[in-house]
Image: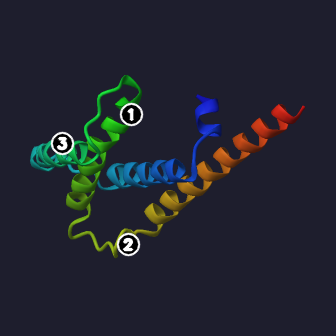
Amino acid sequence: MLRYFASLSIGKTVLWCYLLWYLITVVSYFDPSRAIWLNSLGISAVVGFALMLSVGGISSRKERWQTFRLFLMPFCVSSFSSLIKGKGYVLLIPPDRTVLLLSVGACVTFVIFVQSLKLASRRSSDA
């Protein structure tokens, strides 16, 4: 697992930060309403399938994570949108300073973690 994080590209590091931001928002503003989660699943299925078609379909075993992400992203966007509705968000910025600090802090901590793994990996390969 550490090798995976040590080899993350900048793009995938950003995607992990998106996920952290999303998870902190979900925990902070969770709503158990079935409608939110079922609608998000439906949107995920429709948009995820369209995204699969747009990238030419996914057939190899190696690309299972890409397929998962193609369905996960619309689910996260839809549920995020529903959860923050009427909560005073400006773009993606929460009105609650604690939630904002947790979100930014989680992303910064993750980036530092990944960069330190990359540095350690380089040092061990140089030795």
On the image, numbered disc 3 is attached to which residue?
49
At a point 40% along the width and 70% down the height, the residue shown is 93
Q: Nearer the viewer, mark 2 or mark 3?
A: 3
Looking at the rendering, which quadrant does residue 116 occupy?
A: top right
Q: Earlier in the sequence, mark 1 or mark 3?
A: 3
**Image spot of residue 57 (x, y percent):** 25, 37
Whether tag 2 and tag 3 are in contact, CB under 8 A, the answer is no
Task: Give the residue number, with chain letter if any, for mark 2.
Answer: 95
| Residue 39 location (% of width, % of height) | 11, 48
Q: Residues within 10 Å of mark 2 (few under 14, many from 20)?
A: few
The residue singled out by tag 1 in the image is: 65
Q: Is residue 10 above or below residue 126?
A: below
For label 2, the SS is loop
> CA–CA distance between discs 2 and 1?
33 Å
Residue most extreme to the right: 127
* Location of the N terminus (image quadrant): top right
Classify the position of the C terminus by image quarter.
Answer: top right
Q: Which mark is residue 96?
A: none
Relative to 19, is 10 on the left or the right? right
**Along the line of sight, which residue is nearer the eye, 20 or 32?**
20
**Of the residues under marks 2 and 1, which one precedes in the sequence?**
1
Q: Is residue 48 above or below residue 102?
A: above
Q: Residue at x 16, y 41 (%)?
A: 45
Residue at the spot 21% in from the left edge and 70% down from the top edge: 86
Q: Residue at x 23, y 52 (%)?
A: 79
Q: Amino acid at mark 3?
A: Phe
Q: Nearer the viewer, residue 127 or 28?
A: 127
Please state if 46 lies on the left or on the right of 96 as rendered. left
For the image shown, how many numbered marks are present on the structure?
3
* Residue that extends furthest to the front in the rendered view of this protein: 56
Q: Residues within 10 Å of mark 1 (few under 14, many from 20)?
A: few
Q: Position of residue 102 (x, y in %)?
A: 50, 58
